[in-house]
Image (cartoon, rainbow, N blue to C red):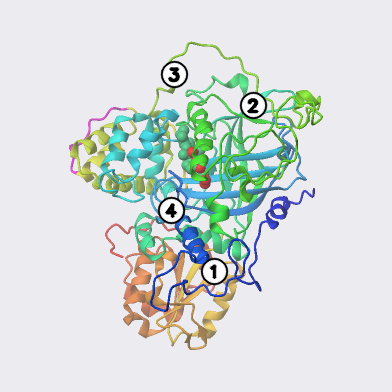
Amino acid sequence: MADDGNRKQQQLDQYRVDSADTRYTTDQGVRVDDTDNSLSIGERGPTILEDFHFREKVMRFDHERIPERVVHARGSGAHGVFQVYESLAEYTCADFLCDPSLVTPVFVRFSTVAGSRGSADTVRDVRGFATKFFTRQGNYDLVGNNFPVFFVQDAIKFSDFVHSVKPEPHNEIPQAQSAHDTLWDFVQLQPETMHTIMWLMSDRAIPRSYRMMQGFGVHTFRLVNAEGRGTFCKFHWRPKLGTHSLVWDEVLRIQGNDPDFNRRDLWDAIENGDYPEWELGLQLVPEEDEHKFDFDLLDATKIIPEEEVPLRTVGKLTLNRNPENFFAETEQVAFCTANVVPGIDFTNDPLLQGRNFSYLDTQLLRLGGPNFQQIPINRAVAPVHNDNRDGFHQHMIHTSRTSYSKNSISGGCPATGVLSGDMTGVFRHYTERVEGEKIRKRSPSFGDHYSQATLFWNSMAPWEKDHIVKAFLFELGHVERRYIKEQVVDRLTNVDTGLAAHVAAGLGLPAPTAKGVNHGRSSPALSQADQPSSLATRKIAVLVSDHTDAEALYPVIQELENGKAICDVVAPHEGMAGPLSVDKQVSAASSVLYDAVLCTGGEGQADDGYAVQFVREAFKHGKAIGVLPDGEALLRAAALPGRQGVVEASTGDDFVQRFVDAVVRHRHYDRDVASFPA
Ligand code: HDE
């Protein structure tokens, strides 16, 4: 088979159905004369049971829904490829990580966690980042998140956590929100949540785009090389476009303007050929260093700071194809942490061990039986042969006369490694010596719940700290029970007294007593300040009117588009604005759907409330604002309280470059917008 990354697509080709130039039939292939009128006795008489076409059509409709994922229900997927830069054979025998010439097909699904399938994309939440690698040695699933840590340490606490963050049981309110009593009650009683809660309150929880967020395998995994030597490993995905977030006020408005904001962004980027890319980074820890850290490597509420174990960049993931059918592909894809290939193994992380059970279990319910691996999107491209048989929806016709091992009738096939004497590509569990008493007890090495929450806080830029404080205030501001707020503030004193004091002040609670717990350490890699960034795929709204100086505007748009920015011409009406073709009418557009604004249009623009609001809102949200000479009236009308990131053509001749620099900054967080109403 070719190793050009197309193996999965070639496999899917045989299942694709193209209805172009076809005739309408029943599911049995019988042609249908009319699908608009049911069979009845007389024109106004009763419908009759004999109408097999109607019965089939309505039955199929009644059965269209399957249970949505109990978590990560809302998601978006894409196909792509992965390629390793250099051989990692020193650490692993996984062939997709050892052969740089191999292009491995993948399917990736991004998701939010708490909301249901129809909830908005831009909510404060963790994002799922699940990758299925269709390797020649079988499917490998890296089912990660965009945070490197998790809320609980042991899988037995997962349902408690999820029940607390889901809508409350009596009225199913609120949807896709952590801002309510039960989540914060759980948090105050379960201090192990605190590190991940800091991430949840940070801008990481509101990514600008799936294309601009990191991914993490979270757990410490184990790579195993051909000699059977293990190396601990943390997986990281690093977006080529840098890690960037929205601002909270923007998030609230996007939910109304475009609930599919992240889904659409991913889809459009791939359709436009702007294929999202991530680099795979590994943190590798020799087994002998297992106990060298001041936390337990098996504790999923901890990171290994990159300053202690640097990331080794080993390969690249590119998403280059949208699914053709959302249900068939994105909804039916079934990830499982237990899907590993030779060379990748587990550790005794109790969260990971529990997940290995849960994912298989959940697919049985969700996809209706044990043959879900045969659904096209889930099929391995590696050959599959075993003695598993039957069950609901068995698609294969196994012609063998035996379905047991060992057998002599079928020549001993399919033969295991041991029976065939051929151990090539065989998965062999890592040999680990384990002994101990059967106990229900958390290891004391899992006991420090605050040091890394403090590390995270200390690593934030001032504006990131400000956003975290405001997030706590928003969240706890929605909590009804005062004692829960007090308890959360008390927990925060174990992270940083200053943080606790700011939150307490905002909530009108007494100032907490200083505990002097802050160890003063930081990990600069945790901050989102100074991220790589580019103009490519940035969305820029060009505000125009019928009086825009088009001759001045054309070259500016041209230069921005040369840099792969996406410019939308936004005008008071659709159609043409002078010689300019309009993409969006201003009342149907919103600044929150763009990264930057370019102002033009002459004096009249100052009287267009939508245009003025557009600019003010963009300013409030830290976005770059470019002003061509005929945009000065609009700028004046917006009465902005500062000039950071506001670039005027009248103040120099390198306007486009200055504007591009301002856009590439992503957001101008240094603006003082606290007292500025959008
Ligand atoms: Fe999941 N998780 N999870 N999770 N998770 C599911 O599997 C579970 C955890 C993650 O796009 C479910 O197919 C347990 C950590 C992603 O289809 C379920 C525990 C991380 C997705 C499940 C965790 C994740 C899921 C629901 C605690 C990051 C979406 C539907 C031990 C490393 C995959 C499904 C997709 C989905 C169980 C914790 C990531 C119920 C028991 C930690 C990205 O099986």
Q: Residue 338 at what x, y percent from top left? A: 58, 33
Please state which amino acid type lies under the numbered disc 3.
Ser
Disc 1 is placed on an element classified as strand
Residue drawn 62% across and 66% down?
Answer: 30
Q: Does the residue tagged 2 have its C-beta within 8 Å of any atom of ligand 1?
A: no
Q: Residue 593 at what x, y percent from top left? A: 43, 65
Distance of mark 1 from mark 3, alpha carbons? Answer: 52 Å
Please state which amino acid type lies under the numbered disc 2.
Thr
> What residue did someone put label 4 on?
117
Mark 1 or 3, closer to the camera: 3
Of the two numbered discs 1 and 3 on the same chain, state the one appearing first in sequence: 3
Q: Residue 410 at what x, y percent from top left? A: 79, 31
Of the two numbered discs 3 and 2 on the same chain, state the one appearing first in sequence: 2
Judging depth in this view, the residue of 176 and 42 nearest the camera is 42
> What residue did someone put label 3 on?
443
Judging depth in this view, the residue of 310 and 420 nearest the camera is 420
Distance of mark 4 from mark 3, alpha carbons? Answer: 37 Å
* Magenta-highlighted residues: 508-516
> What residue did someone put label 1 on?
566
Mark 3 or 2, closer to the camera: 3
